[in-house]
Image: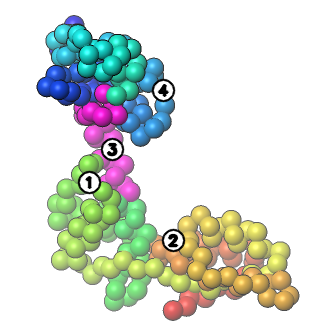
């Protein structure tokens, strides 16, 4: 076997010995989290001591209590480390970067004007400060760090808007459908005449969108106002 392997390596050190398997990187990570089948994960059904050199591992039963390749592969993935491909790292980084920027643009306001800050303006500021996103760091941790850095060059704070929605009976189903996708319901009550009064908390970046959707289904019969 050449040094160019057709996938990623998952590796486990056990009692001073090295055990490796060749896997599909993304499927292996999912399997480690309880998704998928081991048969789909393995690219080569063999246990190696050095996969790049093609050196097969011996005495498997002594190390694992079985010589079943699939069962051993499960242990290696669950207990060992999975080598991430460059392609996976790039894709994971881009996904995490977009998630962080989406969260900030949804929740960020200018504290002076109380208006949402457009994502484009946030992206330009991120580029200016040269913030480096990491695929292997938690979203919340990176968000907090990025916000602190952005505060040094622009007025920005994270906030949430509270809205009071009053809906006639015929629109209540639509109201729930729209609200539950992106808002937190803080309180709700039904009036004797069937009207629903609901208090919600919502990111400022999508307030206009929510109000627009509610107005479109009701033609003004749903009352909406911002509350403290």
Q: Is residue 50 visible?
A: yes
> Along the horizontal axis of the image, is 123 left or right of 38?
left
Which residue is labeled 2 in the image? 206
Residue 107, how many percent across, how many down? Answer: 41, 73
Label 2 sits on a secondary structure element that is helix
Question: Which is more toward the observer, 57 or 192?
Answer: 57
Note whether 184 is above or below 181 in the view shown: below
Which residue is labeled 3 in the image? 92
Which residue is labeled 4 in the image? 37
Q: Main secondary structure of the magenta part?
A: helix
Q: Is residue 44 visible?
A: no
CB within 8 Å, label 3 to label 2: no
Note whether 43 is above or below 113 in the view shown: above
Closer to the observer: label 4 or label 2? 4
Q: Closer to the N terminus: mark 4 or mark 2?
A: 4
Closer to the observer: label 3 or label 2? 3
Which numbered circle lies on residue 137?
1
Closer to the observer: label 4 or label 3? 4
179 drawn magenta: no
Tell me the magenta residue range. Answer: 76-99
Q: Quadrant of residue 209?
A: bottom right
Q: Closer to the N terminus: mark 1 or mark 3?
A: 3
Q: Closer to the N terminus: mark 3 or mark 2?
A: 3
């Amino acid at each position: 076997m050449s040094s160019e392997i057709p996938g990623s390596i998952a590796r486990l050190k056990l009692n001073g010995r090295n055990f490796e398997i060749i896997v599909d990187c993304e499927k292996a990570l999912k399997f480690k989290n309880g998704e998928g089948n081991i048969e789909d994960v393995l690219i080569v059904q063999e246990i190696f001591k050095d996969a790049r050199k093609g050196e097969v591992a011996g005495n498997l039963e002594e190390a694992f209590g079985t010589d079943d390749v699939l069962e051993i592969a499960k242990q290696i993935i669950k207990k060992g480390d999975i080598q991430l491909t460059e392609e996976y790292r790039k894709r994971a980084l881009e996904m995490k970067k977009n998630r962080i920027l989406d969260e900030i643009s949804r929740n960020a306001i200018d504290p002076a004007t109380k208006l949402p800050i457009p994502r484009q303006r946030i992206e330009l500021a991120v580029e200016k400060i040269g913030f480096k996103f990491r695929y292997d760091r938690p979203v919340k941790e990176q968000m907090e760090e990025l916000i602190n850095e952005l505060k040094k060059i622009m007025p920005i704070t994270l906030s949430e808007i509270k809205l009071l929605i009053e809906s006639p009976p015929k629109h209540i189903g639509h109201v729930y459908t729209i609200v539950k996708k992106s808002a937190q319901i803080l309180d709700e009550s039904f009036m004797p005449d069937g009207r629903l009064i609901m208090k919600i908390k919502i990111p400022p970046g999508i307030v206009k969108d929510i109000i627009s959707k509610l107005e479109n289904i009701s033609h003004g019969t749903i009352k909406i106002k911002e509350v403290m």
